[in-house]
Image (cartoon, rainbow, N blue to C red):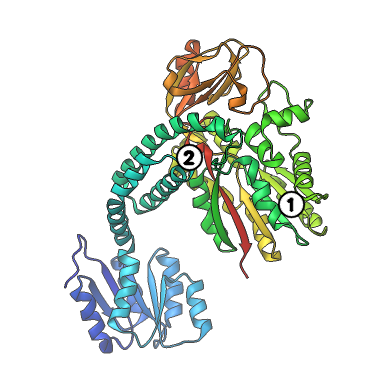
Amino acid sequence: MARTSRTTKRILWVDDEIDLLRPHLLFLQARGYHVDAISNGDDALQLIQEAPYDLVLLDEQMPGRRGLEVLEIMRREVPHQRVVMVSKSEEDHTMTEAIGRRVDDYLVKPTSPRQVLSVVTRILEGSSIRQQRAAQDFAARFGTLSHNAQEASTAGEFASVYTELVDWQLRLGQAGEEGLLDTVQSLVVDLRRDFGTWVMREYPRWVQDSADRPRLSVDLVREFLVPRLGPDPVYFVVLDCMRLDQWRAMSPLIAEYFEIEETYHYSILPTATPYARNAIFSGKYPDEIAEERPGWWDASDDEGSLNAFEDELLVEQLRALTGRDVPVHYEKIFSDRQGEQVRSRVNSALKTPGTVVALVFNFVDLMTHGRSESPILMEVARDEAALRDLTRAWFERSTAFAVLREASRRGHKVILTTDHGSILCQNPSTVFARRDATSNLRYKFGQDLRAEDRSTAFSTRDEKDLRLPSGRLGMSYLLALEDYFFVYPTKLREYQARYRNSFLHGGISPEEMIVPVASLTPRR
């Protein structure tokens, strides 16, 4: 049956034995392709200059210019031309040289018409086929996914629906299915609403160590790091403020070097560095840390003052869990300009048997915060898809990736995670507060603090609901739900203009709370 297409794809086949390939040409033409045949490289180069071709099938062993010579000229004159090399040679060096010169595929003669069609279809029709397949798969899955989202009532069910929605965002985005992405987004919006209601009800039980609570920030070291301690070093890497979709965009790069076992944890509240990351490194809630170390904790919410002791917290937690002193090398990296020094210090630390290399990378968090202050960054990372792309571009050239590659080369295992995610905020929620209220846009503490619309925030006067340190008399706690951010009535327009469409964190949403944990085992 002939293939139908809006635009007939043009193929140029270059082979000195082109007459012997007549069945192949007819087979392609019968499926709707326009195929021109030529017997030498010089004429092929002339034709390509005169009219564009969607694909060139290029024989390697021809009189006159060999296929590789033609390919070299083609790459200079028509650098984006798609080329399939066809050769009788099965020698590795011929194939590797062709691949090195960026052929799109490589076929060894004799080839059947069906083999050629398979390669041609993959190169010329692959994206549209994937787009159609993605649309069909989502349509088939939509009913079940929608039902699962509406019926979710446990930590596992909410996480399962959210992670599947993230996968559809990535897959449909890659396929260019903008219309279906809107459908996915509507499911995400509905899920956020139900998730917030559920978390408000369940979270106070979780932090009192209810039997059915999910894995939280306080569990990560005990569940993932301690079982991997031994004579060999192990890495514990935290990428601050990394959403699940950002991780999924980066993980294919890591998969080249590691076997990845992925799961998730729920960030504690507020989903902000001073609370969630301290909980990871200490294995304790904020009220426990404040009680044991009152000098470490003050009434501010400043990361610099509240996250200054992560290395000590990790050492103490490992001692409590193992009954011995585990050697720890801790680094907090704010800039890739530190890359060489970081790698040097890590390599030195690895000489100590059984050491834990704990690394915190702050770039994603800095990028997320800086986006609200920089018009250029706001434009570059204008939405979730753009933020994913920007994160992947950073990671590919980052100190973090360089350190992971070195860990793989040395055969060391890695636990990679984050403290919390972020959410693209669109809707302001007006709050009334005294001057003592904290400045955060997704969570606030203060006296006589209240939201004008109670449905936009989780509100409590009991610090035990959040396991926060005891506050002053009359202290209230507000956490934003869904994609709301807090504004004051006196600065309503200023805050809306400045922070609408910003990635923020500290509140209650799947994007902020359901975040990845990956166990990385080096590929051998």
Q: Earlier in the sequence, mark 2 or mark 1?
A: 1
Q: Position of residue 444 (x, y in %)?
A: 57, 21
Residues under numbered marks 2 and 1 in contact, where contact means CB atoms less than 8 Å apart: no
Q: Residue at x 16, y 73 (%)?
A: 1
C-alpha span from label 2 to label 1: 33 Å
Q: Which residue is mark 1?
A: 357
Q: Position of residue 337 (x, y in %)?
A: 69, 46
x and y, in percent, of residue 282 in the image: 71, 39
Q: Which residue is mark 2?
A: 380
Can residue 315 be seen from the camera position used here?
A: yes
Q: Position of residue 445 (x, y in %)?
A: 60, 19
- Identify residue type, mark 2: Val
Q: Nearest the camera: 358 or 14?
A: 358
**Which residue is nearer to you in this view: 97 or 265?**
265
Judging depth in this view, the residue of 86 and 484 nearest the camera is 484
The answer to whether residue 503 of the structure is visible from this angle is: no
